[in-house]
Image: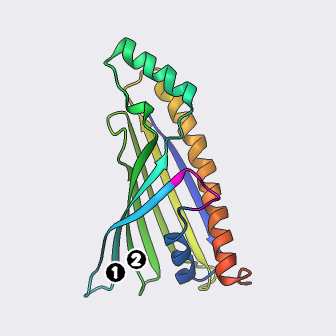
């Protein structure tokens, strides 16, 4: 089945400053779930000027311990023994395409961990706002689908949906804080 979370935010800061803040957003003491972010590939297309980046983020396993135990017991009872739920961290891969000429950046990310049980994908865009060229619009759609744990699929998807919504709001607060530190007060209309 799966759940989808949509986010839309207008940052009252110029595109270049928003992208700069996004690229240095994690790790951050305001979100201790993101342990590290590493650039594993970066290249610039000389003909278009588009900058491609691939980053790997290591995040804390946020599935509550009680839920991990219940799932581990059910997996042992009904399927085969799997210790993947007990891992302390998960990995996410993020790819981005920054187009400085068009003042836009497209981002795609997905989970590299638990791929046999869950699919987590996000697509995001930062672009110059149509309301004001000195503002930046952020649009994100995240989708999580859990399979392989029977009637618990829905429970895990509900947990994931709540976690994604809270995480998106926390990410926006972090961005606003970084932008204010870097640039001062937001730009007026």
Looking at the image, residue 93 lies above or below residue 76: below
Q: How many marks?
A: 2
Residue 88 numbered mark, or none: none
Q: Position of residue 16 (x, y in %)?
A: 52, 83
The answer to whether the residues at label 1 and label 2 have Cβ atoms under 8 Å apart is: yes
Q: Residues within 10 Å of mark 2 (few under 14, many from 20)?
A: many
Residue furthest to the top: 77
> Relative to 168, is 9 above or below?
below
Residue 12 in sight in this render: no
The percent coordinates of residue 181 (x first, y second) are 68, 77
| Residue 59 vertical position relative to residue 22 in the rendered view, above or below | above
Look at mark 2 in the image and give the residue it sits on: 98
Write down the region rendered in magenta: 28-34
Q: Which residue is mark 1?
A: 50
Please tell me whether mark 1 sits on a helix, a strand or a loop: loop
Q: Residue at x 64, y 56 (%)?
A: 170
Quadrant of the snapshot with the C terminus: bottom right
Q: Nearer the viewer, residue 106 or 87?
A: 87
Q: At x 52% / y 54%, what residue is drawn?
A: 34
Disc 1 or 2, which lies upstream in sequence? 1
Which secondary structure type mostly characterizes the magenta part of the structure? Answer: loop
- Element at badge 2? strand
Residue 116 picture location, percent across and down? 32, 35
Q: Image quarter for residue 172?
A: bottom right
Q: CA distance from mark 1 to mark 2?
A: 5 Å
Within-10-Å neighbours for mark 1: few <14, some 14–19, many 20+: some
Q: Is residue 31 magenta?
A: yes
Q: Is residue 157 visible?
A: yes
The residue that appears at 38% across and 68% down in the rendered structure is 96
């Amino acid at each position: 089945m799966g759940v989808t979370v949509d986010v839309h935010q207008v940052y009252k800061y110029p595109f270049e400053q928003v992208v700069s803040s996004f690229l240095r957003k994690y790790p951050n003491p305001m979100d201790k779930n993101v342990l590290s972010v590493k650039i594993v590939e970066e290249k610039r297309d000389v003909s278009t000027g588009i900058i491609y980046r691939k980053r790997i983020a290591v995040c804390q396993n946020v599935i509550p311990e009680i839920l991990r135990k219940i799932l581990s017991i059910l997996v042992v009872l009904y399927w085969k023994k799997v210790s993947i739920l007990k891992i302390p961290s998960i990995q996410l891969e993020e790819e981005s395409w920054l187009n400085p000429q068009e003042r836009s950046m497209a981002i795609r990310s997905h989970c590299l961990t638990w791929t046999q049980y869950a699919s987590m994908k996000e697509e995001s865009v930062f672009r110059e706002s149509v309301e004001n060229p000195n503002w930046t619009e952020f649009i994100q759609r995240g989708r999580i689908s859990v399979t392989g744990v029977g009637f618990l699929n829905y429970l895990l998807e509900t947990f994931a949906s709540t976690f994604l919504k809270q995480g998106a709001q926390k990410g926006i607060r972090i961005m606003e804080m970084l932008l204010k530190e870097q640039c001062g007060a937001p730009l007026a209309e």
